[in-house]
Amino acid sequence: MHIRKAAPDDLETVFQITQQTIRTVYPHYYPSGAVDFFAQHHKKDNIRTDIAAGIVYLLTDNADTACGTVTLRDNEICRLFVLPEYQGNGYGRALLDFAEAEITKTFDEIVIDASFSAKAIYRKRGYHETAYHIIDTENGDHLCYDVMHKSTTH
């Protein structure tokens, strides 16, 4: 497995990983209006801007197949997704290990917006909830998530 900075020609790959993961996993946790809102939030223009800023990373397996992505914005872990067929094989852990290591080089605290599907994972890694948000979406649906923090000082 290998993690590298995403290049401009990786836009479609990062977009597909993000959208496929949202459309496959999130309907088990959120109503359709929230899933649509979240998918739209991670549109190509936003990903393109982040790639141009040099803050998007791509994870490939040993066969050089792209299977995960993460975006690091200062001390915040954003857009961490692993394709559903690769979940449960350590790829998400590798991305999170990488993200935490990069952030701790500069910052004393890591921030992440946690979906319902990932919240337990972050708790096990020492993150704690600091805020709870509800975004009104289509059809009277809501996107709910926690902001979680983890201190990097010992």
Image (spheres, helix red, strand yellow):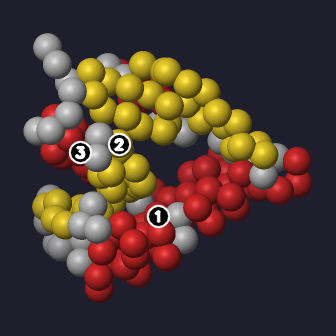
Q: Could you tell me if residue 89 is visible in this image?
A: no
Query: Label 1: how many residues lie within 10 Å, few (<14), some (14-19) or many (20+)?
Result: many
- Residue 18: which numbered mark, if any? 1
Real-space CA distance between mark 2 and mark 1, rounded to the nearest whole angstrom: 17 Å
Q: Would residue 80 appear left or right of 5 to someone viewing this image? A: right
Indicate left or right for 34 with 109 as reference. right
Labels 1 and 3 touching (C-beta < 8 A): no
Where is mark 2, residue-wise?
Answer: 76
Residue at 32% of width from left, 24% of height from top? 150
Q: Nearest to the eye among marks 2 and 1: give it.
A: 2
Looking at the rendered structure, the secondary structure element under dot 1 is helix
The residues bearing labels 3 and 2 have C-alpha atoms spaced at a distance of: 9 Å
Q: CA distance from mark 1 to mark 3?
A: 17 Å
Q: Residue at x 30, y 51 (%)?
A: 72
As drawn, the residue found furthest toward the top would be: 154
Q: How many marks?
A: 3
Residue receiving disc 3: 99
* Residue type at tag 2: Glu
Contact, mark 3 vs mark 2 (Cβ under 8 Å): no
Q: Residue drawn 16% across and 72% down? A: 63
